[in-house]
Image (cartoon, rainbow, N blue to C red):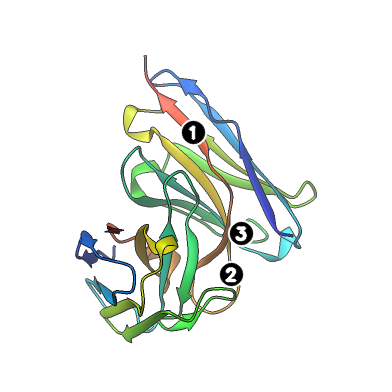
Amino acid sequence: EVQLVESGGDLVQPGGSLRLSCAASGFTFSSYWMTWVRQAPGKGLEWVASIKQDESEKYYVASVKGRFTISRDNAKNSLYLQMASLTAEDTAVYFCARETYASGIEFDYWGQGTLVTVSS
Amino acid sequence: DIQMTQSPSSVSASVGDRITITCRASQSVSRWLAWYQQKPGKAPKLLIYAGSSLQSGVPSRFSGSGSGTDFALTISSLQPEDFATYYCQPGESFLSLSFGGGTKVEI
């Protein structure tokens, strides 16, 4: 059974940093693109970042470029999101998701999410 | 960036109704469009990919259509478990990844 379990969400002060993790199981992690998507309270979904299987390609939404870094450790079946210079606008539930590897870009498995709150 | 415009933003319906949600892209995404269902407090669930392909395990009352810039998600006969928020997502390139604003289907 495919499982994605996020962790690391917390209350952090503006300007602070945080590292999110996503532990994957039930599939060959190293064969898939992986992605972070976030959802601010009461708002819609926002794609944040994606990473290729071998880390040779990484993509970010404009609002987090230069502040967030996506990475992965295929030996540990884990995905990470290092977040810095956090602002209130980064407050959201952060989901990790697996890209289907089927046709276009779509996400067939998601974690349950981890909440990041940026507030003083 | 590709902008995705979903309509309506919300729809009131009853069990058994047929409803259609539309999604318009600011530029062509060929057939690369996905639809998701999200219930409160839960992760999104993939329903449709490549415009009209049904994800494994998704009931056949869900269908997708369209190509280029105009797409639609139809639920042929609403069931109680279908009351949720639905999002479209263009899937042509990581350089233009986004989600539509969402459509809330409520009683």
Task: Give the label, 1 or 2, closer to the camera.
Answer: 1
Q: Earlier in the sequence, mark 1 or mark 3?
A: 3
Mark seen at residue A56? 3
Q: Position of residue B49 (x, y in %)?
A: 47, 76
Q: Are marks 1 and 2 in contact (CB under 8 Å)?
A: no
Label 3: chain?
Answer: A
Q: Earlier in the sequence, mark 3 or mark 2?
A: 3
Q: Quadrant of the N terminus of chain B?
A: bottom left
For this orientation, the residue located farthest to the top is: A120
Q: Is residue B81 left or right of residue A41?
A: right
Label 2: chain?
Answer: A
B39 or A97: nearer the eye? B39
Residue A32 visible from this viewpoint: yes
Q: Quadrant of the C terminus of chain B?
A: bottom left
Label 1: chain?
Answer: A
Residue B2: image quadrant is bottom left
Q: Amino acid at mark 1?
A: Leu
Q: Position of residue B15 (x, y in %)?
A: 33, 68
Q: Position of residue B3 (x, y in %)?
A: 25, 64
Name the element at disc 3: loop
Pointer 1 local density, CA inside 10 Å: few below 14, some 14–19, many at least 20: many
B91 or A39: nearer the eye? A39
Mark pair 1, 3: CA separation: 28 Å
Pointer 3 local density, CA inside 10 Å: few below 14, some 14–19, many at least 20: few
Indicate whether A110 appears above or below B18.
Answer: above
Name the element at disc 1: strand
At 59% from the left edge and 73% from the top edge, which residue is drawn?
A: B57
Mark seen at residue A115? 1
Residue A41: image quadrant is top left
